[in-house]
Image (cartoon, grey):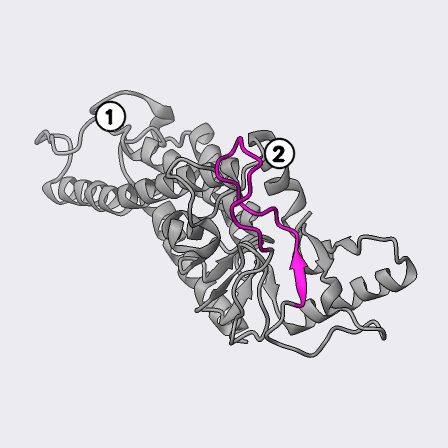
Amino acid sequence: MARPSKKSNVLVTLRYMSAAAVALLLTIASPRTKLWDNGLDSEVDQNYTTLNVGVLMDLVIVSVLTIISFFAVQGSDPGYLDDGIMVKACEQFSLMSQNNPQNRSQLNLLGDVGAMELELSPALSSNDGRCEEDEEKQLILMRHSPPRQNSGSSNLFYKKRLRSYCAKCKFAPPLRAHHCKECDICVATFDHHCHFIGTCIGERNHCRFWWFVTFQFIAFSVMISIITSRKQVFIRKEDEDTKFDWILDNLIIVFTTIYLWPLFFSAMIVWGSQTWFALSNTTTFEFIKGRNLEYLQGIHDCDLPFSNGFDQNIRDFCCLRDKAW
């Protein structure tokens, strides 16, 4: 399985830290902003003589939180599903069935595949407690609730608990899982593979990814508020600065603006979409593919087939799925 290597994680970390350092240094270096001269509104006398400690602390705190959230999600396990996990789950269910025949053979296997209820198919259980060795058959029924026709209906239009057989992973992945081409492995409740942080986002780290995007959006907002506080950009008085200093100051402001604004809008779009996906129990992959996915065929444009209400969706998203808790 081609999971991210330590070398690739180091390269991604260096790339991100370099980009973050550039954004931070450009913001601090921008002259005549509220970061300097105690945030005075003077259009003439502002320079680097006095630092606004309050604004600097806001910038430092949000930057530190962003970096911490980055390390919390970068290189983390999104919910990889491999042969070992599937077989282990199958064996545990077989033992439960043997010990208690009346038991429904369900288990919340938090340590291996996230907050799912798993159920052993009776047809796949043999007398010795082992699963039949038939790769084409579905070893485990992952009890992700099948999608409904709309968020307020109990009418299920997709009855299966598993997706189609994955030839590369040699098993049928659970509902909402997907084989990530970058990682070359199936991921539970697959959202997307984030190239920016070099990490696949799925059931186990989706919440941490949301926190990372949130802090990143706040950090860019603080930086934008600092550079847009400058009163004069292109105005110059002959007795105020030398021509070279004036050109340098404005070049810094222009370059910082060009660098930060696209990042700010990108972070805002990602944060808004990920927030909605968390509230509605949807994923980026499902939003993009829509009815092209076999288990979403027949839904309408505004349906929320996996939603259990915003409050329950948030509890599941924040408290049950993520491996960090």
Q: Residue at x 51, y 34 (%)?
A: 151
Q: Which residue is mark 2?
A: 312
**Is residue 114 found left or right of 169 in the rendered image?**
right
Q: Where 256 sits versus 16, above or below?
A: above
**Disc 2, disc 1: CB below 8 Å?**
no
Q: Which residue is mark 1?
A: 45
Q: Amino acid at mark 2?
A: Gln
Magenta stretch holds residue 44: no
- For this rendering, which residue is in front, 136 or 204? 136
Instruction: Please state, as top left, top right, bottom left or bottom right, where the N terminus lies in the image.
Output: bottom right
- Is disc 1 placed on a helix, strand or loop? loop
Magenta stretch: dominant SS?
loop
Residue 262 percent coordinates (x, y):
27, 45
Q: How far apart in space, not on screen, are marks 2 and 1 (Cα)? A: 55 Å
Magenta region, residue range = 139-160
**Is residue 52 found left or right of 163 in the rendered image?**
left
Q: Where 66 sits versus 142, above or below?
A: above
Q: Residue at x 44, y 35 (%)?
A: 56
